[in-house]
Every structure is written in C-alpha cells, then in structure tokens.
Amino acid sequence: MIRIPHFFAALSELLYAALDAIGVNTWTVARRTDTFLRRETMKTVRFKLMGPNITAYHFGSQSEGTTTPGLQSDIDLLYSYDDVNIMFRLSDWKQGKENLLMVRDETTPAQHYLLQWYRSDVPEPETVPLKSRYKELDSRGRVFLSHRLVIDIFAGVFGKKHLRRGPSYTDNKDFDNVFAFVCNTLPPEIASWFNKCRPRYWPSTEVLEVARQCVCFLIPDGYHKSLNKHLEWRVTPNLIERKLMFSMNMVQRKCLVVLKMIKKQELVNYIDHEGCKITTFHFKTALFFTLERTPSNVWTKARLLECIVRTLQTIHEFLFQGKCPHYIVDGVDLFDGKLCRECQKSLAKAISAMIQDDMRVLFKLQIDDLGKRLMQRPRELRVDADVNANICGKLAKEMFEEYYKEFRSLAFKLCIDEQQDLVTSILGTIRSARVYANSEGLSQYIKDCAQFLDTHLRSMFATVVSSGRLQTEEPLPLIIMNNETLDTDAASSRLKLASMLYCCGDLQRAAYELDDIAGRFDDSVQSACACRRIMNEKLSEQFCEFNARNSVQMMSRKLAFCVMFTKQEMFCVPTFLRFEMFRAVGDDVQHRHFTEHLWMDCAVVDARPFMLYLQYLTYRDLGALQLQSQAFYKLEHIVTSIEKLNQLYHRETVINLFGHCLELEGDILKAIYAYAYCLRQEPRNNAAKWHIALTIYKQLSRRSE
C-alpha cells in the first residue's frame, strides 16, 4: 500500500506546471514526434528512390517526446534492410531473394536467433559458404550470417574511427545507428504477449490491435555470455514499444521524464562497478508494468507524484528480486549483463530512501533547473514561451538540415553515376519522386518528402542544363527557374539563379535578383547547412518565434541554406569560386571526415556572404561604385567579426571570397594575408593554397613584364 503524504497533490500540480514550463507539454511533445517521423520518412524515401532498399525508423526519447533540452538525449536510428527475406518457417521462402531462416535450439539464449543461409533458387539450405566474410560454417555443415556484415557496412559509412556501443554504431556521441533485418512474422515469444491474461488497465484493446500489425526486427547483438555471440541476432519489438509510448497521456510521459532525470543525476552515483549501468529502458519497462496494474483514474495531474512513486516501487521490486522482466518478450532479464547484484542492492536502497523521504530528491534536480522551479510560487510557473520557441526552432532547423542532407546524398549519387547521363538521371528520379508524391494510399509524410525532393531536383536540373549552355556559350532560356523551384528555402536557389545570370553576363537581371534576395534576409531568417560543421549554434529569437507560430510547411521559408554547386554546375559559378571544387592538394582527401566526401568536391558557401560577394562582383561590373563599396564593407564586417565568423559553416570559403575582393580592390598584401590566415585556420582541403600561389605568380609575372 502506498503512503501518500497530504502535500503530494499540491506538489504534483506544481511539478506538472514545472514540466510544462521546460517543454514537456502537449504542444512540444507533438512537435517532437512529428519532426522525427518526418525525418525518418525523408531518409526512407531517399533510400527507396536511389537504393539500397532500406526503411529508416527513429526510436527512443526524441521521437517519443519524453526528453528535455537538459537531458541531452541522443538520437536513435534503426535502418531496416528490406531486400533480405527473413523466414520463421520454410514456407516463408521466396524465390530469387536472399533467404535467411531464424534458427534456435535449447542452447540458444532467450530473445536470440541464428540466421541460416538458404539458396535463392530452391528452398534448400546452403551447405558450402562462398568466399564471403559474412558466412560462417558450423560443425553440422550449416552456413550462418555473422555480424561482420554490419561491421563492414558501418566502417564503410563512418570510417575506421567509428564507435561501437552494443549493436549501435556511431561517429558522434549524440547519434546511435543500428542495422536490422525486418521480421514480418512475429516469433512466439512476442506473439504470446498479445494473448496473455492480465489486468487490462493498459494497454487498451485498440492499442493492442494497432500494435499487432507491427513487425519486429533482428539486430546484431549476441548474448554477452555466449560463445557464438558474433552469430546471434536479437529479436526486438521496437515498433510495438513505440506504439505503446505514443498511446500514453501527458501525465504518463511526464512521469517517465522525471524518472530519467532522477536516474541521470542521482542514481548513477550508486553504481560503482565497471560495466554496470541502469538504463532508460529499465525505467520505461517499469512504467509499462506500472501502467498495466494501475487504474486509469490514477494517472491525473493531481496524482503525478503518486504515479512516479508507484513506478519507482516497481523498479525497486525488480532490483530487490534481482530480475527485470522484458515487458513484451518472454524469458528475458533486462538486468542480465547490465547490472551486477551488488549494484542492484545499492540502487534498491537508494530508491527506497527516496520514497521514504517523500521524494524530496525532486528539489535537488538541476537538469533544466527543475528543482529551482519547484520552489517558485505556483502563479509564477507557466509555460515558458521562449523555451517552447527554442525547442521548436531547433527541431525545425535540424529537420530541414536532415532533408537537405538526404537531397545532397541523392544529388551526389546521381553525379557520380557514370552509367547514365546526369540530365537523364535527374529526370528519371524526378518522375519517381512525383509517383510517390501523387500516389494514393501513402502517408502524407511520404508525399511531403517526395514533393520536397521533386522541387529540389528540378532546381538542380535547371542549373545543370544552364551550366551546359554556358559552357558552349548558348543563350539561357528566358524562364530558367519558376517560383516553385526558387522557393526551396529563403535564398539558396535564388542565389544560384543570380550566380548563373552573372556568369552569362546578364548583370541587370542579376542585380535585380540580388536586391530581391537581400530584402528577404530579415531578422527571422536563420542560416543553415546540411554539412553539420557547427554544433549548438545560436538561433535567432525571431526565427524561433516564427516557427512556433507557423506550420512545418512554412518553416523552410525562414532558413537560408548554404549554396552548393556540383562540378556539373561549374559554369554557373564565378570563376574564383570554382577553385573550391579542387581544394584537395596532395593527400588532403585522406584527411576528410566521411560526411565531407559528399560536398568537398563541390563549391559550397554560406548564403548571406555569397550574396554579398555576388553583389560586389555585379555592382563592380555595372560601375555602381557606391553599392559595390557597401557590399564590400558588409562582407568585411562578417569576416573581421570573430562572433560572426564562428557562426559560418564554410568560413574558409568566405575568407577566400573576401580575399578575392581585396585583390580586386588592389590591396594584394591584405589579400595574401587573408588567404594565409584562412590556411592557418583550415590547413587541409583549403583552396587558399591555390589562391596564394596564383596571387604571387600574377605579381611576379607583372614585375617581369
């Protein structure tokens, strides 16, 4: 029986309001979920258009909306490879496919399977492994798939310096990437969960029916004590768990957020054995069991603190008994391999002390200043509009950066395809994207993402065709880009149009476009880049407020993405900027991060400085000296301000552009100094090497004359 102090109701109301204030409220939770569902959809659509046949899923705190800025939750991404047929029984075999049979015996750990290779022409097992690093023969002549496949995949993506944490791989502590196979037939240990007799407080029949339609996954994660763990694949019901999380109300989500804070700040101090840890999933599991056995009328705002105590009692029960059962999968102990018995006892005592102390631990919580907020007067605790706006602005910016990253991956793959003409490839991909965008029965997320790719592909098509015409000195068509392809974001496509107009000598029209772009750069426009070279940059208040007031469809209008020209668009770029496409000198290529291979052979520059550079060139050629000087001093202000320079994504390129302006102004020494300074900042993969050499060569040539 739970002892409920008289002040719990008032403190619950206060805690509920405090969580609202730090961004755990209906509005931000919905925006988080919507954002990450869109992000996973964009990745999936890009994969479906260009291959391989992969479906992406975001799982965990970010997509569930059970996090805060202070919790700094990582981003979990699962890639499901859909071209392999996973068989639970031989009748699932498919001709012409790579077939893998889920195999287990009395020695196979719970929740784990071996994947046996079957032939693609007849439903018979492979007996002799071909020369492959991924196939391993056992003593009975069976051929199994090893984890080496996944290791090599992620090594190819992230390079040799990637980190491995269990089944996840990453090159960044904020991201966890997991490779998986989809298992369309639910294994018995998961299917049996739907038929269990339990007090049906939760989940509801409707939620169970939706969850029953979900697939599960096989991930490369062997049992820690197994001799064959490199061959074992763990079955995991992530989609079912996500459906359960999405069905929760705000009280239940807030309960989990508070538990995460307690775990992160307080309970970690009671774990003193190397390799031991208590995870968010342990608390999520405890919440599932608590929901199942607690009447729905308990989960109210006034009883939030009681719900937290009930969940802590559940985890205390697991720790006291020495076993944490998986909520869905039979026969699994979630403490096994995670928490030793000594740590379990230590944590049980700590949790018991917290409950007996009437949860005064809440006032100690420093994450998002929750403890301080609980000491405020109730009327001072209201939803913090700035916190909501900042969360919304960050989500919007990162979502569209992911969108652009996927588009650029698509564009990069089209450009390196030597089997087909680039223009033909772009047109074919546009047709495929339009099929997605106009198909019936597909989700609105898929249609929106396909429409995004369609618009950007048509913008790229215009610049590739225009570059070909400029190379052969043919006139450009009167309508190069229409309004739809220009409105990809606040400025980048319009800047590409202005650049090609400058390159073809249409200076008046270029000046008109540049003036129009300059008028769009108000305080609510936020710089953005898919290259991810700056982390935790400052967002403008106006941008955050705009995104808090408007729909997702409106967000891109206030983002000014860096302008990228591929080599196939070279003749739409001012001559000086083309050197960025050949920035590698010597072994510079060997010193690139894996993501840099997608753009370092292109000319990429921040939108606002590029606009000023184009204005300088255009007004100079037009003889508009006053406007030329204004553009020069504005660009100089960006380059000479440490704060503004540090907010640039491609600062070496911007410094080089300013150096070129100094050359054109006749200040050669300052130009060389700018290039040298740039090279000190970025000694590798920097076109400044070319500019220094060419500037000195030109000066020596003039003297010799």
Image: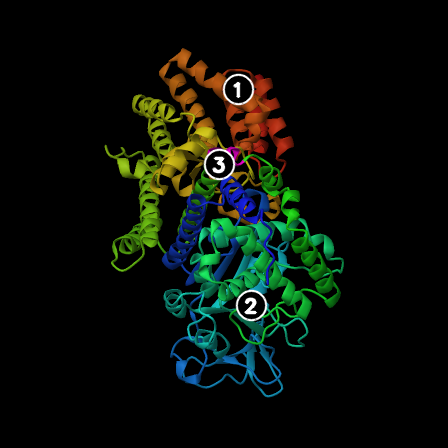
Mark yes or no: residue 486 visible: yes
Q: Badge 3 is on which residue?
A: 382
The furthest residue to the bottom: 140
Q: Residue 283, how many percent across, how many down? A: 58, 59
SS of the residue at dot 2? Answer: helix
Q: Badge 2 is on which residue?
A: 149
Vertical position of residue 124 compared to residue 168: above or below:
below
Q: Residue 420, how many percent across, how many down? A: 35, 55
Rendered image: mark on residue 53:
none
Q: Main secondary structure of the magenta part?
A: helix
**Residues packed near mark 2 inside 10 Å, few (<14), some (14 to 19) or many (20 plus):** some
Q: Earlier in the sequence, mark 1 or mark 3?
A: 3
Foreground disc of the pair 3, 2: 3
**Residues packed near mark 3 inside 10 Å, few (<14), some (14 to 19) or many (20 plus):** some
Going by the image, does 264 lie left or right of 507? right
Q: Give the Cα distance between marks 1 and 2.
A: 51 Å
Q: Residue 359, how many percent across, how many down? A: 64, 50
Q: Give the Cα distance between marks 3 and 2.
A: 51 Å
Q: Badge 1 is on which residue?
A: 637
User: Which residue is painted at 57% across and 21% down in the image?
Assistant: 640
Check disc 1 and give the amino acid type.
Answer: His
Q: Give the Cα distance between marks 1 and 3.
A: 40 Å
